[in-house]
């Protein structure tokens, strides 16, 4: 092989090696980015699960029969009807 052809061969090998090295670095950066997104998503899930649990407790408290009776009396001025005012359907 002539001397100039060997330099071209080495340049091609160096270019291919550089391409692989840059590809490896890019892939590692993508892995780090996806890992960071995964951590943020897990934190969000944990936060939302805590909020859901709090809302379930609030829902249970607001829909308790005693609480509904208090709210019916307070907001709507409703009370338990007298027995003679109750109409029974056949």
Image (tube, rainbow, N blue to C red):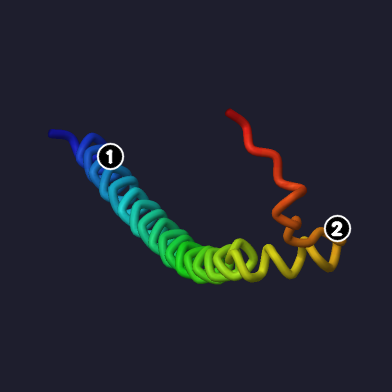
The circle on residue 12 is 1
Looking at the image, which residue is at 39% across and 53% down? 26
The C terminus lies in quadrant: top right
Mark 1 Cα-neighbour bin, 10 Å: few <14, some 14–19, many ≥20:
few
- Residue farthest to the left, as pictured: 1
Identify the element where label 1 is drawn: helix
Q: Is residue 12 above or below residue 81?
A: above
Horizontal side, residue 39 vs residue 10: left or right: right
Q: Up-down: is 78 above or below 6?
A: below
**Image mark for residue 60:** none
Residue sitting at 43 percent across and 65 percent down? Answer: 42
Question: Disc 1 vs disc 2: which is toward the camera?
Answer: 2
Q: Secondary structure at mark 2?
A: helix
Q: Position of residue 78 (x, y in %)?
A: 81, 59
> In the image as oriented, which residue stretches furthest toward the front?
84
Q: How many marks?
A: 2
User: Residue 50: x percent and y percent?
Assistant: 50, 71
- Whichever of callouts 1 and 2 sits on the residue coming sooner in the sequence is 1
The residue positioned 39% from the left and 62% from the top of the image is 35
Establish if 20 lies above or below 55: above
Spot occupied by residue 55 in the image (x, y as percentages of width and height): 58, 65
* Quadrant of the image occupied by residue 32: bottom left
Q: Which mark is residue 76?
A: 2
Of the pair 46 and 20, the residue shown nearer to us: 46
Left or right side of 16 for 33? right
Choose between 32 and 28: the one closer to the eye: 32
Is residue 70 or residue 46 the one in the foreground? Answer: 70
Q: Residue at x 70, y 54 (%)?
A: 83
Q: Quadrant location of the N terminus?
A: top left
């Amino acid at each position: 092989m002539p001397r100039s052809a060997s330099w071209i061969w080495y340049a091609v090998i160096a270019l291919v090696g550089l391409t692989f090295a840059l590809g490896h670095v890019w892939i590692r950066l993508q892995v780090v980015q996806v890992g960071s997104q995964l951590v943020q998503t897990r934190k969000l899930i944990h936060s939302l699960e805590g909020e859901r649990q709090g809302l379930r407790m609030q829902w249970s408290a607001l829909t308790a029969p005693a609480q509904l009776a208090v709210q019916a009396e307070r907001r709507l001025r409703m009370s338990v009807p007298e027995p003679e005012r109750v109409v029974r359907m056949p």
